[in-house]
Amino acid sequence: MLLNWLSRRLAAYLSKQIKCYSARTSSWAAFQGSIKPGDVILVEGNTRISTAIKYLTQSTWSHAALYLGPEAGLGIAEDGEEHVLIEADLEEGIRCLPLSFYRNFHTRICRPVGLSERDISRLIDYSKSRIGHQYDLKNVWDLARYLCPTPPVPTRYRRSMLALGSGDPTRAICSTFIAQGFQSIRYPILPERLAESDDDADSQAQQREYFRIRHHSLFAPRDFDASPYFDVIKPTLEQGFDYRQFRWAD
């Protein structure tokens, strides 16, 4: 009980906003017009825990949310806007949000290529079944440890620190929750490439490659950006950019 209380107090501390100098790279209208169900939204967060995640992963992106769209039936916000996003929040657990929640953040849209309507439906069902599950508070202690400017951990081991959670399937961090969703429909993110044989370079088996699904706890937000199976969608270009019409301040 005491550890739970301390974890929640630490979660509240880590959720506090700090100064953030990032800026949006597209208009809100272009962003709204480009996003589709199944897209992963990467966010450059502005909280203390965002600092830890960005440092550990050596990436701009500290958070990820999954866009399911208005047809997913996630409910209505207090202001009447439809909930279309689902994410794992440090304090509230897995929750639904309107798209405008991240309107003023630096974001990136990562789109799974060729996702079928059936798999989108399965992804929606899986995500909705997880609503209300809690954030993995054991990870909170792991991440808090690395808020100091120079953590006493070699660079090659920093990434593995994100896999120190409880392993409880009813708990998740933002990227592992989404990774589990895609793994539930057998969609790859960053599989390891494995040859069938390392001994005989001339064998046919050596030329065949197999994919082993990485454990969901090892995924970080940047992996969706780095994945060869996700398109990076730039809303300004999606809406028809013409450099000849660009207005320069001469």
Image: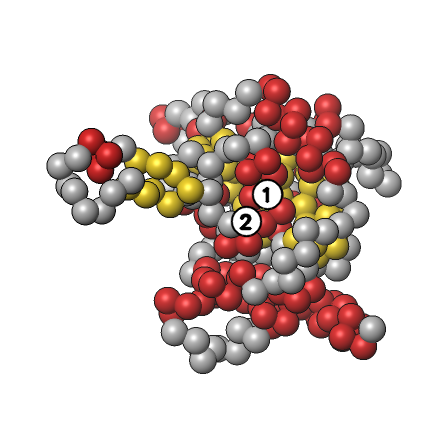
Q: Is residue 206 left or right of residue 92?
A: left
Q: Give the quarter of the figure containing the C terminus.
A: top left
Residue displayed at 45% across by 62% down: 159
Q: Residue at the location (43% across, 76% down)?
A: 153
Please tell me whether mark 1 sits on a helix, a strand or a loop: helix
Viewer-side residue, 149 vs 234: 149
Q: What residue appears at the point 65 percent right and 62 percent down from the top-left corner?
A: 166
Quadrant in the picture for residue 164: bottom right
Quarter of the rendering containing residue 15: bottom right
* Residue at mark 2 to residue at mark 1: CA–CA distance: 6 Å
* Residue count near mark 1 (Cα–Cα under 10 Å), binned few <14, some 14–19, many ≥20: many
Q: Is residue 105 visible?
A: no
| Scheme of image coloration | secondary structure
Question: Is residue 249 positioned above or below 145 on the image?
Answer: above
Q: Secondary structure at mark 2?
A: helix
State the quadrant of the N terminus.
Answer: bottom right
Identify the disc placed on residue 180: 1
Q: Residue furthest left?
A: 202
Q: Residues within 10 Å of mark 2 (few under 14, many from 20)?
A: some
Pinpoint residue 170: horizontal percent, then vertical percent. Answer: 72, 51
Where residue 215 sits: x, y (%)? 51, 50
Q: Is residue 154 visible?
A: yes
Q: Amino acid at mark 1?
A: Gln
- Amino acid on which the number 2 mark rests in the picture: His
- Percent from the top left, x then y, of residue 202? 13, 37
Kindly check if marks 2 and 1 are in contact, taking CB atoms under 8 A apart as contact.
Answer: yes
| Residue bearing the label numbered 2 | 216
> Which of the 4 image quadrants contains residue 19?
bottom right
Q: Is residue 129 left or right of residue 219?
A: right
| Image spot of residue 239 (x, y percent) | 50, 24
